[in-house]
Amino acid sequence: MGDNRVTRIWPTYVQSVGQMRDQKVRVAAVCSKCRQWQKVDLDAIIMLRGRSFCLIDQRGPCRIYQCDGTAFFMWSTGDSTPYRPLTTDRGNHARMFGTGHGRGQEEEPPPDDEPPEPLPPAPAGISREAWAKADTYERKRLLRQARG
């Protein structure tokens, strides 16, 4: 497939659907089962998910009536430019083994403006940030250090 040590750098106009629409990038969904191509309405995705939603490594259901496959996204900048997949090896690995960021089609992505998780209470004399990042051994060390 590819080298796992190499990170793919995506162009900025492909990293969100809002930028794709602004740059007039053409997007298609291709079913991995029936191989049908469908045009993607970026305005509808913006209305559902917001301008910052990213299509990289996303999958969706095929829109053909009797097909139960999943579609991945392809992008192109113009008529003379070939379509390129919006997938990475890391996303394919996550879907294959059920780990990482690979979400199923029935799950919804987390909301964009979710408040950050509150830090756990820390003992007196220890910063809350250090206590939140520490494991059990590090917490014992922090307690010994705070006691003197």
Image (spheres, rainbow, N blue to C red):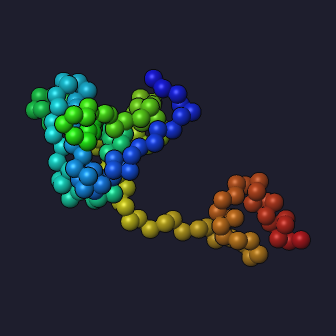
Residue 30 appears at what percent x and percent y?
A: 22, 32
Residue placed at 20% from the left, 59% from the top? 47
Q: Observer-nearest residue: 45 or 61? A: 45
For the residue pair 88 and 94, the one nearer the viewer reads as 88
Which quadrant is home to the C terminus?
bottom right
Percent of width and height locating residue 146 = 82, 71
Q: At 75% from the left edge and 60% from the top edge, which residue is drawn?
A: 139
Left-right relation of 95 to 134: left
**Residue at (33, 57) in percent of width and height:** 52
Which residue, as the protein is rendered here, is positioned at the far left?
65
At 38% from the left and 50% from the top, the residue drawn is 12
Question: Would you place residue 84 above or below residue 47 in this image?
Answer: above
Q: Position of residue 99 (x, y in %)?
A: 47, 37
Taking the view exactly as shown, the residue that stands out farthest to the right is 148
The answer to whether residue 29 shows anywhere in this view is no
Q: Quadrant of residue 67?
A: top left
Quadrant position of the N terminus in the picture:
top left
Give whichever of 140, 134 is nearer the camera.
134
Q: Residue furthest bottom?
A: 124
Q: Position of residue 113 (x, y in %)?
A: 38, 65
Q: Is residue 9 visible?
A: yes
Image position of 120 with respect to 67: above or below: below
